[in-house]
């Protein structure tokens, strides 16, 4: 199966599940569940519960609501992803820009049934990537097109045990579609398609969480999300001129998060989060016919975030945050899925329209690092290059209390 390593570098594994975004977090994780969280680098998002989007991080947070609420919005992502200083088969290549702009929608609804039990529903995304090399890029057996999308459809419940402790439980249906193309231009022959995948699949996961309230000003949250293995297939599943046998199976990483929130006075609050992502579960891409297409050497990753919220008056809140996000890739890297340690610099605000409605705005500048990449294909071709992925994220969100 050595030739499969040419046609299925890291990006093919992504083609079966992901959202059309790029270089947002370690591996192919998306941190873009709400504009509110974006404005504080998602610091404290598993415990703050300032709107219905809390259920994307911790279902137990729904227990903090007294009335039904809906939140809906979108985050725009403009990625600046470069492959530079590339050498292919001893020849220098021009620098390549493989980023773009995409949008991540989200919607959440929380409905308290009584004083102790709350239900909620959500649509959002946890994983995604998109990169696209120009059609005439000489090393397109390593690059090509990866246009990938996913959505998480969640149903959750929360139960308040007492004035201090609340528990949450949820189910997640993850659906994904993706397109992936690889080709090689051969002199006197022309373009030879090496890979053409147009796949979709689903998986069922679950999540569990808890919130402990010391008092009305101090609380902590802990949550664990079990991500499903995605099985994907489609009408176009071609490798080296032949249709793939069986379904593609891609393991998604489980995640755990701890958050804290502290209201220090009437105006100022601080909050923080530590998230763990089990990227070593992404060990290989295989099929249901027991064929291993590729192996990976990713490592578990962490991100650390801290933020603050300042209440100016009844109508305005401003927030800011910082996140350090560690890379999932270790010794094995790829030009098609650039990854590095990243820093998030975030700010945002909330404007309230009276007692029932509010509008959130969030913005983040994501700063990556230069990473040296060396890849060798099953055909014996090789490339060395430097990749860098930066991004600008900005989002709007509307919240309404019924």
Image: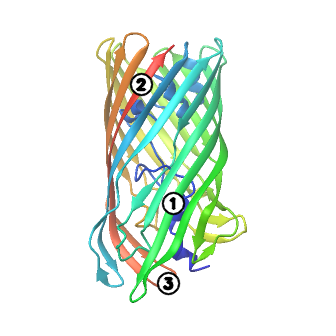
Q: Nearer the viewer, residue 159 or 20?
A: 20
Q: Residue furthest bottom?
A: 188
Say whether disc 2 or disc 1 marks the residue closer to the N-terminus: 1
Whether residue 397 is visible: yes
Kind of element beneath mark 2: strand
Q: Which residue is mark 1?
A: 179
In which image quadrant can residue 61 be found? top right
Between the C-alphas of marks 1 and 3, the distance is 23 Å
Residue at 59% over, 52% down: 252
Say what secondary structure mark 1 lies in. Answer: strand
* Residue 333 drawn at (x, y percent): 44, 66
Q: Could you tell which of marks 1 and 3 lies nearer the N-terminus?
A: 1
- Residue to which mark 3 is pinned: 379
Q: Quadrant of residue 399?
A: top left
Residue at 51% in and 60% down: 179
Residues at discs 3 and 2 in contact (Cβ within 8 Å): no
Q: Is 215 above or below relative to 132?
A: above
Is tag 3's residue or tag 2's residue first in the polypeptide sequence?
3
Q: Residues within 10 Å of mark 3 (few under 14, many from 20)?
A: few
318 displayed left or right of 234: left
Instruction: State the CA–CA distance, disc 2 to disc 1.
Output: 32 Å
Along the viewing direction, whichever of 30 and 163 lies nearer the viewer:
30
Mark 2 touches mark 1? (CB < 8 Å): no
Colour scheme of the picture: rainbow
| Tally of marks | 3
On screen, residue 182 above or below 117? below
Disc 2 marks which residue? 398
Q: Quadrant of the N terminus?
A: bottom right
Q: Residue at x 40, y 59 (%)?
A: 131
């Amino acid at each position: 199966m050595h030739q499969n390593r040419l046609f299925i570098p890291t990006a093919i594994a992504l083609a079966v599940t992901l959202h059309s975004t790029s270089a947002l977090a370690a591996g192919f994780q998306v941190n873009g569940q709400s504009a509110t969280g974006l404005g504080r680098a998602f610091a404290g998002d598993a415990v703050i519960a300032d709107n219905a989007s809390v259920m994307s991080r911790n279902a137990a947070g729904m227990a903090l609501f007294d009335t039904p609420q809906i939140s809906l919005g979108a985050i725009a992502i403009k990625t600046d992803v470069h492959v530079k200083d590339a050498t292919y088969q001893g020849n220098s290549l021009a620098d390549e820009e493989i980023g773009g702009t995409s949008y991540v929608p989200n919607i959440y609804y929380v409905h308290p049934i009584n004083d102790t039990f709350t239900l909620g529903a959500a649509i959002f995304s946890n994983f995604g990537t998109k990169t696209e090399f120009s059609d005439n890029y000489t090393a397109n057996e390593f690059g090509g097109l990866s246009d990938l999308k996913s959505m998480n459809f969640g149903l959750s419940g929360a139960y308040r045990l007492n004035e201090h402790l609340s528990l949450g439980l949820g189910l997640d249906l993850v659906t994904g579609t993706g397109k992936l193309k690889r080709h090689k231009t051969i002199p006197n022959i022309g373009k030879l398609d090496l890979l053409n995948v147009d796949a979709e699949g689903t998986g069922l996961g679950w999540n569990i969480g808890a919130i402990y309230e010391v008092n009305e000003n101090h609380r902590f949250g802990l949550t664990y999300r079990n991500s499903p293995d995605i099985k994907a297939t489609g009408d176009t599943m071609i490798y080296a001129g032949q249709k793939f046998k069986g379904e593609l199976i891609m393991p998604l990483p489980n995640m755990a998060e701890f958050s804290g929130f502290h209201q220090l006075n009437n105006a100022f609050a601080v909050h923080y989060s530590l998230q763990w992502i089990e990227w070593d579960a992404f060990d290989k891409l295989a099929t249901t016919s027991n064929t291993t297409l590729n192996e990976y050497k990713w490592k578990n990753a962490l991100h650390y975030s801290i933020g603050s919220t300042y209440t100016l008056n009844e109508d305005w809140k401003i927030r800011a945050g910082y996140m350090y996000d560690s890379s999932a890739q270790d010794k094995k890297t790829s030009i098609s899925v650039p990854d590095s340690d990243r820093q998030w610099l975030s700010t945002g605000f909330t404007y309230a329209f009276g007692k029932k409605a509010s509008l959130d705005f969030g913005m983040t500048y994501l700063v990556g690092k230069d990473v040296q990449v060396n890849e060798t294909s099953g055909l014996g071709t090789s490339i060395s290059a430097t990749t860098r992925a930066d991004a600008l994220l900005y989002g709007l969100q509307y919240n309404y209390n019924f």
